[in-house]
Amino acid sequence: MIHDFIYDIPVRVYFGRDQLQHLGEELKKHGTRVLMTYGGGSIKRIGLYDRIVEQVKAAGLELFELSGIEPNPRIDSVRLGARMCKENKIDVLLAVGGGSTIDATKFMAAGACSDIDPWDFLDTTKRAPIKQALPIVTVLTLSATGSEMDCGGVISNPATNDKLGRMSSKLLPKASFLDPANTFSVSPYQTACGAADMMSHIIEVYFNMDQDLYMLDLFMEGLMKTIVRYAPVAMREPENYEARANLMWASSWAINGFIDGGKRQAWSCHPMEHELSAYYDITHGLGLAILTPRWMRYCLDETTVQKYVQFGTGVFGIDPTLEPMEIANRAIDSLATFLYDTLGLKSTLPAVGIDDSRFAVMAKKAVGGGTLPAFKPLTATDVEAIFRMCME
Amino acid sequence: MIHDFIYDIPVRVYFGRDQLQHLGEELKKHGTRVLMTYGGGSIKRIGLYDRIVEQVKAAGLELFELSGIEPNPRIDSVRLGARMCKENKIDVLLAVGGGSTIDATKFMAAGACSDIDPWDFLDTTKRAPIKQALPIVTVLTLSATGSEMDCGGVISNPATNDKLGRMSSKLLPKASFLDPANTFSVSPYQTACGAADMMSHIIEVYFNMDQDLYMLDLFMEGLMKTIVRYAPVAMREPENYEARANLMWASSWAINGFIDGGKRQAWSCHPMEHELSAYYDITHGLGLAILTPRWMRYCLDETTVQKYVQFGTGVFGIDPTLEPMEIANRAIDSLATFLYDTLGLKSTLPAVGIDDSRFAVMAKKAVGGGTLPAFKPLTATDVEAIFRMCME
């Protein structure tokens, strides 16, 4: 059965090289006091910081800054940002960076409009309603999480080893500036991790036992083929605009909600990976790359094989006349080859410094103490088995 | 070169069987006085009229009606609608129907906010600015033109034999209700014409000498495969929800702007077809079906062949190891077979009652008196030659 759904993605996207000239007019729609958030110094190194400050000043806006937002962004940064918004009567937030900066900024925007501790928006026992948030504009510098065009974010709390996500339409950016040239300086390794993250976003939706809209399955296959084709190009030729442009636009469409088409979903690898990066602070895309092929192998059986056949023939061009199980196994092999050989990502948990000492507790948290009602329903025992498959 | 573009499609789409329950709340966002526009009696036959009236009344809104909007909608209907909006102080327009009803309603919405004759918005010598328009909500009953999610419309003026289009962001619907079941009663013939129209919208963008975003080319191929797969199913089994749902959502995405990705465009078959239907009032999709394979044949040469290869292998699965010209010709044959055999559409102009007596004047109008800067630039002589290819 094809479920009903509401499609509503009112993000204005300025895509291309010469779009920053519109930044001032876009920010002005939302007010005059701007808090710009970013991570480390990379936006200064590539000259983006100066170009943004110039646009903001030329538009006559008042600029405040919060830097130092970390990868796997932490709740303390969110708390600080929310406080700065209140103290400085900020009208609009300008997130400049990748998914970490944008995710953190989303919860600052919500925290700025509320008196509660921002962690309460994420804490699974509280889930405080997000009634309002300041408007957010983003300038993207990394193609990966899709946060620039979606309404979710993930925040870490080192005090509790929690890494939790939350979605709300109030968190959707008003506008995002996507200039592929702003990703020219992304390292081959980070480009690879971003590609793995994007692949996972699509795979989590694609591998689903709900009936699909065929049109959307073909779109997902197209997105995956795009990533498989261009991620290696961008690693080899960092300033290849065509490759960076395809990856950037694909990153947004991999997770902005369009591909969902009403499918009931529970993701599998993301909740597992969030435990890994909550406990070990590894790069999200890398964790997903290690987990995904093992999870696919674990879930393959006679009831699920057809989806693997579609994936293998549609994305990797595997001969459709082979036996379904043969196609499925070749499809998993092809994905593993792409992730570990072509992208050069590490392929086991020990290789990234993770041993089996916390598998039990992480597995239990990944399934929320129950069963993940995913592609193949997963209990803590299943997740622990998948973690164990990642040991070699 | 990949051009810059702005992506901005803030239409809220309620997709599925049980979405009409949201109609009242959606209309209420925009006001209390509603003008419902529709064509003939088909919406009464399928019970949609009653269901809409019930929702509007339950929401406490005041309902006005304008029926009788014709296929290839005429400027007189637009004038009447604009006048009704003013006289009744209408807040929001509710278009119930296919592309004709929605297109006409768009220009009523603009006309209602202006003192000029609505034809001045379309007249190529005047092109009056569209500064404002009443909000529009649509309930779609035919998968074809994509008007439910785009900002354009085409209006006929029988007094001058003109059929002209215009786009403006002010004309974009606020929300559209897409229930595939509302297209169950669409005849096999109209289903075929709608499929031909959708195919043409994609082909006009796909066949372009500008550099493409590969990701969008794959999406376009996916949309075309979806139409090729499901149009015949919907013709054979009119109440096949899966087929109707895929066609309906594909119709919106074929022309909402996403696939353009900044490509400089001048369409080819649409301007030619608008002349045919302006002079002979034939169904738009049928005219496109007759023209498109001839236009493709006319434009095929060594400089353009690569796009045909991509089309033939990507949409019709033609063996990529064949010679490019062989693939290209097979691709055109496959499209012709789909349109004339599978969909059963008439394949020549004489078969729809059009002779060559007006080819010269129509050709000249199609290119606006100059040259269409399209996939292959077309002069009036070229267009006349293409019309002539449609004689047999």
Image (cartoon, coloured by chain):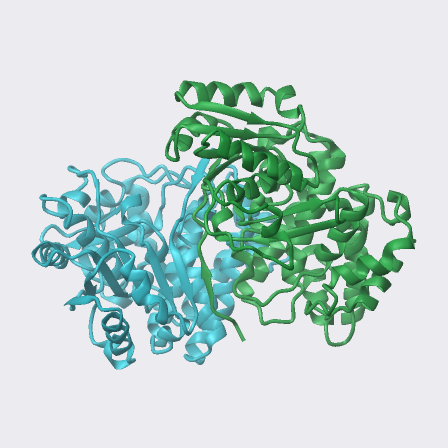
Chain colours: A green, B cyan
In x, y percent, where is residue A78?
61, 39
Q: Residue furthest left?
A: B87
In which quarter of the view is residue B44 placed? bottom left
In which quarter of the view is residue B191 placed? bottom left
Is A277 left, or right, of B241 in this rendering? right
Q: Is residue B290 visible?
A: no
Q: Is residue A112 above or below residue B347?
A: above
Q: Is residue A48 above or below residue A230?
A: above
* Residue sitting at x 55%, y 55%: A128
Q: Is residue A376 above or below residue A341?
A: below
Look at the image and tell me in which quarter the N terminus of chain A lies.
bottom right
Q: Is residue A341 visible?
A: yes
Judging depth in this view, the residue of A52 and B349 nearest the camera is A52
Question: What is the tally of numbered marks visible in this picture?
Answer: 0
Judging depth in this view, the residue of A168 and B125 nearest the camera is A168
In x, y percent, where is residue B347?
36, 65
